[in-house]
Image (cartoon, rainbow, N blue to C red):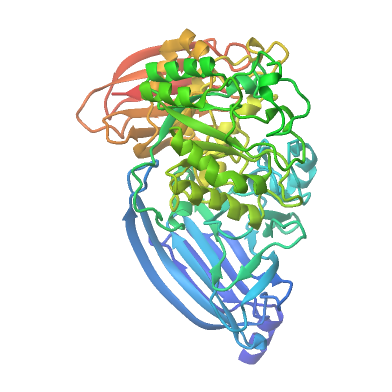
Amino acid sequence: MKKIILACLLLAGTVLSAQQINSPDGNLQLTFSLSAKGEPTYALTYKKKPVIKTSKLGIDTKDVAPMLDGFTVDKTETSKFDETWTPVWGEEKTIRNNYNELLVTLSQKAQKGRYIRIRFRLFNDGLGFRYEFPEQANLGYFIIKEEHTQFALAGNHKAFWLPGDYDTQEYSTVTSKLSEVRAKMKDAVTPNASQETFSPTGLQTPLMMKSEDGLYINIHEAALVDYSCMSLNLDDKNMILESWLTPDAVGNKGYMQSPFQSPWRTVIVSDKAGDILMSRLVYNLNEPTQYKDVSWIKPVKYVGVWWEMITGKSTWAFNDLTSVKLGETDYSKTKPNGKHAANTAHVKEYIDFAAENGLDAVLVEGWNQGWEDWFGKSKDFVFDFVTPYPDFDVKELHRYAESKGVKMIMHHETSGSVRNYERWMDKAYQFMADNGYNAVKSGYVGDIIPRGEYHYGQWMVNHYLYAIKKAAGYKIMVNAHEAIRPTGLARTYPNLIGNEAARGTEYESFGGNNPDHTTILPFTRLTGGPMDYTPGIFQTQINAYNPDNNSFVHTTLVKQLALYVTMYSPLQMAADLPETYRKHMDAFQFIKDVAVDWDQSWVLEAEPGDYITIARKAKGKNEWFIGAITDENAREATLTFEFLPKGKTYTATIYADGTDASYDKNPQSYAIKTVKVTSKTKLKQKLATSGGCAVSIK
């Protein structure tokens, strides 16, 4: 009878060689096993609820036999780990890294004993696992055709998703059932300067989902190094997500040399939405910082010559020429267009504003020659990153900013010509160091040169990290735009102080972001690291700056304040114009006061796509800040103050939407009041449509 049962199990493909580990708190359980065909599989449960059903693992290759099946288990090893580490900057002063580990060594006997390892780490907030390829005689170099990592879901979850794309994340998030992705994909793919979607059910990570039985699930990756970025392709009949790597110009998805390991594949899970926001799993799967000296890496609050160009009030370009050749075009003999913003006198106005209001730095875009014909052209040599326009005096601005105690932030727009940027990188970084710039905002707008490469392929992943490490040699911090979405590498390389890698505030001038946009991003994009979202827009009608632009910001003014707390970043921009801030200095006081580095954070209430309320304590100070935001629906936020030390009374300044405020009709209506609060205080605060509330506590 036992033989008959065993035969039936084998025919059904039932798993063999099962191994299990639990998370330190016992809520999560991982099961690893081999199928009857020798296929590695895993499954994950949370409080006995299925999160990931039995799912296959493996890598298909082009030049060696695939690593998909025919495996046997050589050995398994388990271990425990518990440490507390201190980030250079972050949402809390210290982070606990506590997990149980299962390391499985698998052999493919048919391939002369070739072997690989799969390492699983189970935390209280989720799972990380990766493929490891030790150095061995029968596995040296090989090309990845595709990685076949599955995430078999337990239902047709509600998902917050972006179209899978090799070149951009700058889409509006769609909220729908997974079964509706295919029908909604066409409308979800909106125009961009560079884009390449790959499937009618392709999705990007981080992918946030909510199950019908109340589980919040986030799928992403950690420590993306020397590997292609992972997207997900959805089998919408069986509700199985499968990894889909970004190819290179000839269609290959990775060039590997052992020993090496893949990035971690991550699944964060909880029955509380706030736990997703507080998870540090992705950071914990990255290596400790590589730098012995981190004293030069400091959080930054800045203003910049930027929003006026985004709105069309001013220009990046010095003149209106339609064709220029850097090194050949003599700008001193051309006629200025009269709208060039990056001129010495105007930049000094920004420096003055920063100095007057205690801001750290000033970003200037459009300072260097070449902006006249850069956009949309497949042009290799657009910028040299060291040659200013005639009206931009680098030395004088260095002197002036230094005299005011203000730092300058350089801007390097590569125009997608990565090959050219690498040619100039050392000279450009040295130019920055010589002229007082300790941070750079880099950009990668447009199709990548070398032609055919994508923003998220292995070649570009290596470039982004090369730029970060190269910048560190000059003690320069990097804020990369249009780059790969972050995967926690800022733990290892903390001079990666900011990223865009999502649809930011600039799109408010290009037609607007949906009111629920910033209630979703902390659950998705911010999973892997902070975003340079550039909040602080007070003049929400764009035609106030450019009569030809009728877009408007889809938030109230107060929601813009709250974003400084809910959208975490150690690099925060006061993105509007100084003359606008001077009209609302009472509201601007919150931007002046709010911290950019924190001792501790608490999620007071949250639901992806609907609302977020977060409290934070400023690093090294007895100051706390609260930010509350909502989507297009007005609501009442509950503000609790249990995080305050007990037995003491504090003064809270509350910046609130006005009683008649709404994002589309009366966004600049706000009220400011002070109240006394203790750890026992509970307040109800009304939020307008796409509105918010910001609180400063001292």
The image position of residue 161, as x and y in percent, is: 66, 43
Q: Is residue 580 above or below residue 622?
A: above
The image position of residue 506, as x and y in percent, is: 62, 27
Image quadrant in which you'd find residue 368: top right
Q: Quadrant for the C terminus, please.
A: top left
In the image, taking residue 645 as reference, residue 337 lies left or right, namely right
In front of the other: 274 or 471: 471
**Residue furthest top as drawn:** 583
Q: Is residue 10 above or below residue 398?
A: below
In front of the other: 183 or 96: 96
**Residue furthest left as drawn:** 647
Q: Is residue 661 above or below residue 490?
A: above
Please tell me how many numbered marks the rendered image carries.
Answer: 0
Q: Quadrant for the N terminus, please.
A: bottom right
In the image, taking residue 425 as reference, residue 181 lies left or right, namely right
Is residue 624 at least partly visible in the picture?
yes
The image position of residue 382, as x and y in percent, is: 69, 37
Is residue 215 at least partly visible in the picture?
no
The image position of residue 515, as x and y in percent, is: 61, 27
Q: Residue at x 67, y 83 (%)?
A: 10
Image quadrant in which you'd find residue 24: bottom left
In front of the other: 91 or 603: 91
In front of the other: 296 or 122: 296
